[in-house]
Image: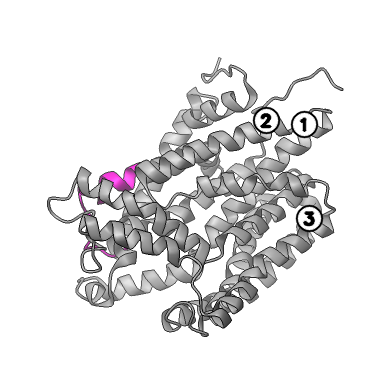
Amino acid sequence: MSNSTAAPVSLQERADILDVLRGLALLGVLLDNIFGFTGYGYSSEAQMKAMPTYYTDAALGLLELVFIHGKFYSLFSLLFGIGFSVILVRNEQKNLNPFPVFYRRLFLLACFGAAHLFLLWEGDILFLYAMIGCLLPLFRKCTDKTLITWAVILIASPILIDLVKILLHVKTGAFLEEIAYKIDDKNGITKDNFSTYLSKPGSGWREWRNWQASGYLYRYSYLIESNRIPKVLGMFLLGFCAGRKMMYANLDQYVPLFKKIRRWGFIIGIPASLAHVYFMFNAKGMPNPMELATTTFYALSVVPLSLAYTSTICLFWLRTNGNNRLRILAPVGRMALTNYLMQTISCIIIFYGVGFGLGGDIGPTIFVPIALGIYTLQIIYSNWWFKHFNYGPLEWIWRQWTYKKRLPITKA
């Protein structure tokens, strides 16, 4: 057994392309999540039509559903799998037991996620990632072919799961939703005020706490109902396979594969995404049989488009030898955990009644530029931060806990 100890990836070993992809994923996640932060995603058709920006809102909403919704959490999931492959593979190559490091890292991620979920915003994804991530070591000895086979089965499994739900006439997330309804009844949250509850005049700390009391139940009802768990694990496995082969460090060897993924990802993904949006608005939810079409086209759109975006960025990166404007996104991705949580804090301050209360009656015409402004600020302060520091603030805590080492946060 080696006498060396587990250590984080050095700054010199970092692959800039992964940080760029993380930075891009954060932009997509923000543009997706902001529909919830503002309350617009909960608005009725009548409330949307009452807004003076209705037509441009509808156009932007359609574009978001077709090109963004689900695609960037899928990219985040892929990158998560790559990141954890680095921990497992690097330590095994050094004849070190990778599991203490692996599970310490997951435990602290679960802590960050739980704090985010219960104290800040119900839309958290970190806690789910930490829980599903615990399953990754079960697949570490699988061949690449087995990993990809499992990934395809898991990503496509919602089609079979939803077929069973339709045949049995059940909603798998209903039990959590019923508990949430009862909590909302006690706290005065109704269908009529649901989209404006957090931002209506006079709303503040109490309303925010009332919302959080049921928010995590709605969130996990949705995650269960939408079969998110197998989808995420499937993307983890794709990322784990790509990370184990170190594709990110040898992009030039995979140009034909990237071109094939880009071509077929767009050819399949865009029409399927349009079809998904059509059925989403017409299927009326589970257990309506039309929901099977929604699920099928979602599976055929989200992962192909996500992989097409990834391949496009990788090919552009190769064509320019990494000397391009995308590099400004790398610092955003290097502190992805910090920036993900900062997006939540920024949106709470801007859109909730505990802050400026701008949400509730604005559409994408107004809040999409605000999201782009938030992200632009993240680019600026992230690039400034890494001129003075080695790690993002939460990343520094995360790595110190993971490796039980004191890491210098400031540059020498």
What's drawn in magenta, residue-wise?
345-364
Left or right: residue 163 compared with residue 118: right
Q: Is residue 376 visible?
A: no
Mark 2 neighbour density, 10 Å: few (under 14) some (14–19) many (20 or more)? many
Label 1 vs 3, first from the N-terminus: 1
The answer to which of marks 2 and 3 sits earlier in the sequence is 2
Image side of residue 216 versus residue 207, left or right: right
Q: x, y (%) of residue 332?
A: 50, 40
Q: Say which residue label 3 marks.
A: 254
Instruction: Give the image location of residue 382, x and y in percent.
Output: 46, 35
Residue labelled with disc 2: 101
Identity of the residue furthest to the right in this view: 1
Q: Few, some or many C-alpha atoms within 10 Å of disc 1 (few <14, some 14-19, many ≥20)?
A: many
Q: Which amino acid is tagged 1? A: Asn
Q: What residue appears at the point 53 percent right and 40 percent down from the top-left corner?
A: 110
- Please name whichever residue, 314 or 63, is drawn nearer the observer in this view of the structure: 63
Q: Are marks 1 and 2 in contact (CB under 8 Å)?
A: yes
The disc label shown at residue 91, or none: 1
Main SS of the magenta part reads: loop
Q: Earlier in the sequence, mark 1 or mark 2?
A: 1
Residue 300: image tag: none
Answer whether residue 26 is visible to the viewer in this image: yes
- For the N terminus, give its image quadrant: top right
